[in-house]
Amino acid sequence: MSNKATRFNRKMTMASAVFAIILLGCVFGMLYYSFQNVKEKSKTIKNLYSIRFDKGLNDSLSVAVNDSVVFSGISNDSLFVTADGDNKQNMISVEDFTTKQSLNSNLPAERSAVIISCNNGKLAVETMKVMGPGN
């Protein structure tokens, strides 16, 4: 009788070992897959936005895209600034130090030209899609 019980215990131990190997393989496979997606989702796109200041702006400004300051100083109409973006949602923040105005605006996820202007004493942001390489 002990021989039957020993064989049954060996079979159960082997089945448990096979199940544990399969389970570990599934866990490591899911971890690998989840880390692959994180790398793709947090991709930074270089020179996604070209920022230009309109002629009516002579004040000192601070411009930030996604919490990164890309310009701080006195603006003029011939100044162009490029900013990196994210492949998800992007935001621009403009602050006028003279009038203490600030403006936050969402940006599109494709390559765009951003024009910062002052209309009737208020800051405004206008975006236009730019066709070019990488679209």
Image: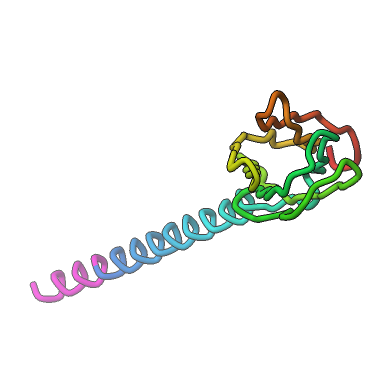
- Residue 77 in percent (x, y) is at 88, 41
Note whether 25 is above or below 129 in the view shown.
Answer: below
* Closest to the observer, 48 or 1: 48
Q: Residue at x 65, y 42 (%)?
A: 92
- Residue 34 in percent (x, y) is at 51, 54
Identify the image quadrant of residue 2.
bottom left
Q: Residue furthest top?
A: 120
Q: Split into 4 quadrants, where in the image is the C terminus? A: top right
40 with respect to 59 (left or right)? left
Q: Split into 4 quadrants, where in the image is the N terminus? A: bottom left
77 with respect to 109 (left or right)? right
Q: How is the image coloured?
A: rainbow
- Residue 10 in percent (x, y) is at 24, 72
* Closest to the observer, 14 or 45: 45
Q: Residue at x 54, y 54 (%)?
A: 33
57 with respect to 42 (left or right)? right
Q: Residue at x 67, y 32 (%)?
A: 123
The secondary structure that dominates the magenta segment is helix
Q: Residue furthest left?
A: 1
Q: Please state the extent of the stretch shown in magenta in the rendering.
A: 1-12
- Residue 87 in percent (x, y) is at 67, 43
Count of numbered marks: 0
* Closest to the observer, 40 or 133: 133
Q: Residue at x 79, y 34 (%)?
A: 115
In magenta stretch: residue 128: no
* Closest to the observer, 5 or 33: 33
In magenta stretch: residue 8: yes
